[in-house]
Image (tube, rainbow, N blue to C red):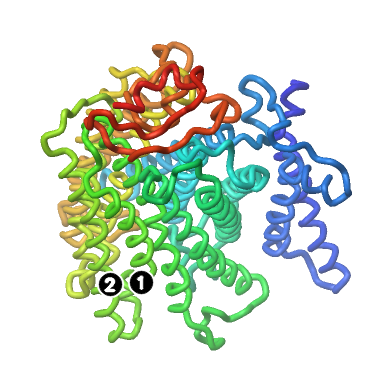
Amino acid sequence: MRKVITVGLARGIFWQIIGTLVGIGMVTGVRFLMGLGWKAEPAWVLGAFVGAIFFMGGVGAVTDWWRWVKGERTLEVHEIHDPSGIWRYFGVSYDHKVIGIQYGVTSLILLAIGGTFALIFRTELAESGLQFLSFQEFNTLVGLHGMVLIISILLGIAAIANYVTPLLIGAQDMAFPRLNAFAYWLAVPGSILLLSAIFFGGFETGWTGYPPLSVRGPLGMQMFFAGVFLNGWSSILGALNLIATILRMRTSGMNYFRMPIFVWSVLATSIIALTATQLIGLSFQMVMFERIFGMGFFDANNGGDPILFQHLFWFYSHPAVYIFVLPGLGIISELLPVFVRKPLFGYKWVAMSSLGIALVGFLVWGHHMFTSGMQSYLRVPFMYSTLLVAVPTGIKFFSWVATLWQGRIRFPTPMLFVLGGIFVFLMGGLTGPPNGTVSTDLHLHDTYWVVGHFHNTMFGGYVFPLFAAIYYWYPKITGRRMNETLGKLHFYLMTPAFFVMSFGQMRVGLLGMRRRIADYDPALGFDLTHLIVTIGGFLIALAVLIFFINLIYSAKRGSVAVDNVWESRSPEWQVPSPAQMHNYPEPFEVVGEPYDYGLAGTQYVVFHNAEVSKGSEGSKL
């Protein structure tokens, strides 16, 4: 018990509670001095942010900076040694690999929570009529399902990027290790606040938080806004760190067009996150101020405009889709040549297509607003810019097909999830244009067709590649391989279940079923389809449960994987697993192309120390 109390996470939560009470007391005291009575909302909102600040101090994320301010000496990052064992993951560490695992575990916990919310409201929808949820409870679960999984995706991307990027470019750590730790720990109180919304009355707006409904909602709406706001700051700081790391810390010989393709996708993603995330934070902050101070930003009666919120919100939230999927597409391009044993076709075009998607992604937000009352003359330009995204995305698909053509394909679990990601994301791409074309979107907007399309995009662009990445890099993290039998059971159960679920969603959407509603008329004949969709959702949950069992089981009992288990040319596989504290005992030099698989006599990286190079025959494959 004593050891638990000294752990950073426990201290942080304790001080978050204290800070929340301090913030509530500050507001209450000021209102008392002004002759005003108790008011819960401003007290809890300030308490939430003060609690987050206290959490960061309690967990130790600002300790070194505070020592520096006081003029005390702080250790260099390479002089700091983390506690051994599992406890190092419950406190502040500056090792990018530890932080990557912290991000990853937090992401998977939120994935399980958000998925559970979906199972609850899907059970309600399996039959017409209200079974066990009220409308308020249903709407809260739908909204939290969406936003909790969005935060889970952001943290999952940060997990892979944090762990893998320095290894891929030959860096010893991230450019700003202390900022890296700060960014992760900021997401923890943010996630706690987001989940706490359910205990403060919930909210009815879905994950978008549209006014005027969000202005009138219960206190849970404010906790929702505060949680997203803090996670947005975490995303911005993490993106800044990744950009600096990629631009300034590449090893000798690694010019931009010798970088692994996954690093290109991380760079493009980080540019979007750095430049666009402020907009969702600003839109939510304005609603918070409108609720607390009576400001009329989005109140038409006070000179405001609710359409302004949608412009601010979607200027981030559509590029955010590419924040979610670009790393996933990068994982597909990174892993595909390894298991096909051929060079990646059109490497430079694939690299540039990531930047192209990031750029065009800023020009398409208006297609979410075709039915909003936005000026009609804006519809056509946004329609064309939306369809333009298909060009850089199509480059990736053509590259994957050409890479697969006549390859010596192997089918371990990571490759299965790569191929699954390609097929599912293709379905997301094919079902997307009807949402971006004015004539069809006017009918499909806010129907279950959009739900099916979005799940295709997220599963194909993120979920399948995420599982591929975990199965692929798990031996590098732990020194053991995940169980192949359980991995393939996970894949072959989840894939058909997902198609059943998404096709069912799109079917009822085409028939007019609106999204975010708790009940429907039994005369419409949707009961059977919704029951099938619900069964598909539970099968997906069962498949993910198998993955979690595999993840935990293999950490202790998985087959040992010290050497280059995938015969990869990538530098992290040229040194023994698991990765050591500072990545590489000496810098390596890049002397060739990253994906020249199957070409005799080629080499990507060279370690000049014979001891380091002893297990690196994969670099010549």
Classed neighbour count for the residue bearing mark 1: other residues with Cα under 10 Å, few (<14), some (14–19), many (≥20): many
Q: Secondary structure at mark 1?
A: helix
* Identity, as a three-letter code, of the amino acid under mark 2: Ser
| Residue 197 appears anywhere in the view | no
Instruction: Determine the secondary structure under disc 2.
Output: helix
Task: In the displayed orientation, state which residue is furthest to the left.
Answer: 406
Q: State the quadrant of the C terminus.
A: top left
User: Disc 2 designates what residue?
Assistant: 385
Name the residue located 44 percent from the left edge and 39 percent from the top edge.
111
Left or right of 513, for residue 302: right
* Depicted 346 relative to depicted 509: above or below: above
Return the mark for residue 363: 1
Contact? badges 1 and 2 (CB < 8 Å): yes
Can residue 342 be seen here?
yes
The percent position of residue 504, horizontal first and vertical second, equals 19, 47
Q: State how far apart marks 1 and 2 are (Cα).
A: 6 Å
Residue at 75% x, 39% y is 14
